[in-house]
Amino acid sequence: MSAGDYFRDNLGRLLFHLTGMGALSVFLLLTDTAGGIVTIILIVWVLGLILALAVDFARQRKRLEELWAILDGLPQKYLFMECAPKPHTEYERGLYQIMRTAGKSMIGEVSAVRRQQKDYREYIENWVHEIKVPITAIRLICENNRGDTTRKIMPQLAQIEEQVERSLYYARSEQVERDFVIRRTTLAAVVDAALAKYRTLLIQNGVCVETKNLDIPVYTDAKWLEFIIGQMLSNSVKYCGEQAVITIAAVNDADGTRLCITDNGIGIPAAELPRIFDKGFTGSNGRLRGGATGMGLYLCKKLTAHLNVDLSAKSVENEYTSMILCFSAILTKL
Amino acid sequence: MSKIVIIEDEKSIRDELCLLLVNAGYEAVVTEDFSDTVSWVLAQSPDLILLDVGLPGQDGYALCSAIRRASEVPILFVTSRDTSMDELKALSLGGDDFIVKPYNIPVLLARIQAILRRGGTAAGESLTVNGLSLYLSRSSIQHGDAAMDVTKNESRILWCLMQRPGEIVSRADMIEFLWDNQVYIDDNTLSVNMTRLRTKLRELGLENYIRTKRGMGYKI
């Protein structure tokens, strides 16, 4: 609050005083009071008024600053009224009551939504665990009865699995604290696990994978990283060309370790590149080839942010797409 | 023959898993009664336990630590709980490995094999079939006095065929085997590698060591 703001707020009061001064001066002059005395009275009045206003302004400003400081210190702003100081005047008490009621209702709403979200997430997680039972059973049945039919069923089953897993990680990406374990692992171990998971899909699409220089230790959550790399493999297969080759290579430098997953597929148009990590963005390739949900890379970006890994992409249309996971030095040399 | 105990409450999975393991040449034992699983397991004296986490009554974690108190038998957790936290818990309670449902079946079998091998004899790093020796760790082959280096891909291809002498191995099976051994190649690359390998074998005087069965696969 500036002095100007305060002045505008108190314009009415000032006008009242000015009118009062005018009226008193006229009355005193008409009753033959000496001009000097009238001047003295007016000077005292004006000084008194200025003093009173200045004190009031300073008090109001101090009070506001105090309240702002409390608000700034709160991570959840809607909890402000729980921490606000006791009101001094009746007017403040009224405002205090109103804001407190509003704040209470907000807190109630927020915790209700939180609870719902938590319930929903737990439901999704449980559902995913339940659905994995029949998926596992189908897979075992296929393996025990190998034939042309089961060879056709397997890739369909793999698709179901991928979608199920994605929904699980989507639910998880919202609240991460619970199932997040940073441990020492190597890029090779995680990449091999992801490749094992996508083996059927990759072999069926005639994809070659070259791995280079992956014996680098990293501190991360292996399961999450495996999921992220899996999403990228799945994308590479979806948008591959003839003679598909995926190169998974790591480079160590001063800033840390970069893991690049590069394919020789159809690439991404330069104009679309900045938006590929946006939720629901499918792009021209996704629309042409179908099957894109615009969720995969969005999820990857969200999960990498939790892992403290920087995810970026490079691409030249009809030449290559490269997904780059950048682990800061602290995650590799702990 | 290694004896594997399956502790799994879902009947469909239990039955199929049992069949899978029997087909893979193991003796598999299952139970439908989970009231006193620990003493039942110990009475079976298995070589390996496949343990689910979500069980009626006592869960897999509790079961694992109870079994650990009495036995050092290898325990492989098989569960649909897939977070790193679950894995950490399983391993810290004395589990030997942790595999997530729905598992990749070759991966499951490979892990079982690896754990059983760990307990028993060490992995054979060399094989000799029909006069040709393959040394995996050195990546070299030897026939008589002549030796020659081979690439990782070539050694894995030979390894795959030499493990099943006399059998026809299909290209699809071979590619799957190679992927399970960290050689990620496609059909064309397999052909290229196969041609190079045959050239090397010819130089060692082993013409037609690997025979092609048209439309079926390869055979040593």
Image (cartoon, coloured by chain):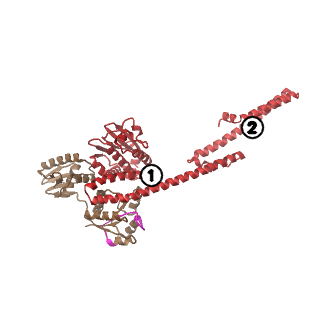
Chain colours: A red, B brown
Across and down, in percent, residue B204 comes to: 13, 50
The amino acid sitting under disc 2 is: Ala
- Horizontal side, residue A76 vs residue A268: left or right: right
Q: Residues within 10 Å of mark 2 (few under 14, many from 20)?
A: few
Q: Residue at x 27, y 59 (%)?
A: A145
For label 1, the SS is helix
- Classify A275 as above or below B4: above
Across and down, in percent, residue A63 comes to: 66, 43
- Classify A137 as above or below A274: below
Across and down, in percent, residue B65 comes to: 40, 66
The quarter of the displayed image where residue B32 is located: bottom left
For label 2, the SS is helix
Quarter of the rendering occupied by the N terminus of chain A: top right
Q: Residue at x 47, y 53 (%)?
A: A177
Asked if labels 1 and 2 share a chain, the reply is: yes
Instruction: Residue under label 1, please give it.
Output: A171
Q: Which mark is residue A52?
A: 2
- Horizontal side, residue A154 vs residue A5: left or right: left
The quarter of the displayed image where residue B98 is located: bottom left
- Horizontal side, residue A171 vs residue A203: left or right: right
For marks 1 and 2, the one nearer the N-term is: 2
Across and down, in percent, residue A272 comes to: 39, 37
The residues colored magenta run B43-61
Q: Residues within 10 Å of mark 1 (few under 14, many from 20)?
A: some
Q: CA distance from mark 1 to mark 2?
A: 59 Å
Chain label for disc 1: A
